[in-house]
Amino acid sequence: MEYKISFSDKSYMFVDDSYVMHLYRKINGKPFKVSIKAYLKFWETFIRNFFFIDCPDSIHKVPLSFSVISSDERKDVPLNMRVKDSQDINVGDFVAGPNGPVIVSDLHTGEENLFEIKIGDNTYTVNEGHILHLVDKEDESNVLDIQVGVYMQMDDSFKSKWYMERIIDD
C-alpha cells in the first residue's frame, strides 16, 4: 500500500509500507523511529505530539506538522522524495539543483511567454525566464545555465552542442 504524507509547508511525499518515519519531540532531540503502519495504528494514542524535521542533519532545522493518508494518486512522483508544487515554493526553501540542494533566494512573478521543454519522457511547461542547466555534449565538465528565452533565440548548431541535465530520476 502507498501513503501520502502532507507537511505544513505544503510539501508532500509518497511512501510505501516499508517507510520508517523519524519523528521528533524536541528540535535537538533524538528521533523516534516508527514504521508508517505503526504510526497509523498508534498516532492518536501516543505519537500525535511528535513532528517531522526538515533536513535533520542541517543547521536549518524546520519542524513541520504533518498528516498521513492512504493514497493511490502518486503517478510520476518518486517514492520517498519530498516534493513541493512550484506555486508553493518560498524564499528560503531548499530545492534540488544540479550540484545538490540550493536555497531559493528570490521568486519571479509576472507574465511571460510559456514554453514546453522535454527531458526524457517528461514534458514541462516553463516561462522564458526559467533557467536551463545545460551540459556540453563533447566536454561534460563544461556546463551552462541559460534562460529559456535566450536559449530559444540560439541557432540549431548551438542547441545541438548541449543537452539538459536531469536533476531527479523518476
Image (cartoon, rainbow, N blue to C red):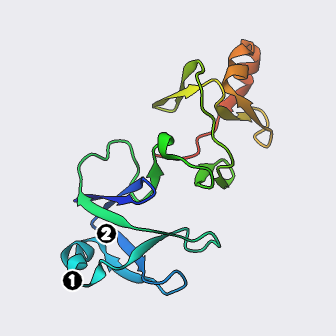
Locate residue 57, reporting x and y percent: 59, 74
Q: In this view, does 71 lie above or below 67?
A: above
Q: What residue type is labelled 1?
A: Thr
Q: Which amino acid does label 2 sit on?
A: Ser
The residue sitting at the left extreme is: 41
The residue sitting at the bottom extreme is: 30
Q: Which of 92 and 70 is in front in this view?
A: 92
CA gap, disc 2 to disc 1?
22 Å
Q: Name the residue under label 1.
A: 45
Q: How crowded is mark 2: few (under 14 residues within 10 Å), some or many (20 or more)?
A: few
Q: In this view, does 157 lie to the left or right of 127?
A: right
Secondary element at tag 1: helix
Which residue corresponds to the image point at 75% horizontal and 40% vertical from the top-left?
Answer: 140
Q: Name the residue under label 2.
A: 18
Locate residue 58, reporting x and y percent: 62, 71
Count of marks, rendered view:
2
Which residue corresponds to the image point at 69% horizontal and 49% vertical from the top-left?
Answer: 105
Locate residue 145, reporting x and y percent: 74, 35
Q: Residues within 10 Å of mark 1 (few under 14, many from 20)?
A: few
The residue sitting at the front extreme is: 110
Task: Indicate the quadrant where residue 31 lies.
Answer: bottom left
Q: In this view, does 84 lie above or below 24?
A: above
Which residue corresponds to the image point at 40% horizontal and 84% vertical from the top-left?
Answer: 32
Mark earlier in primary sequence (2, 1):
2
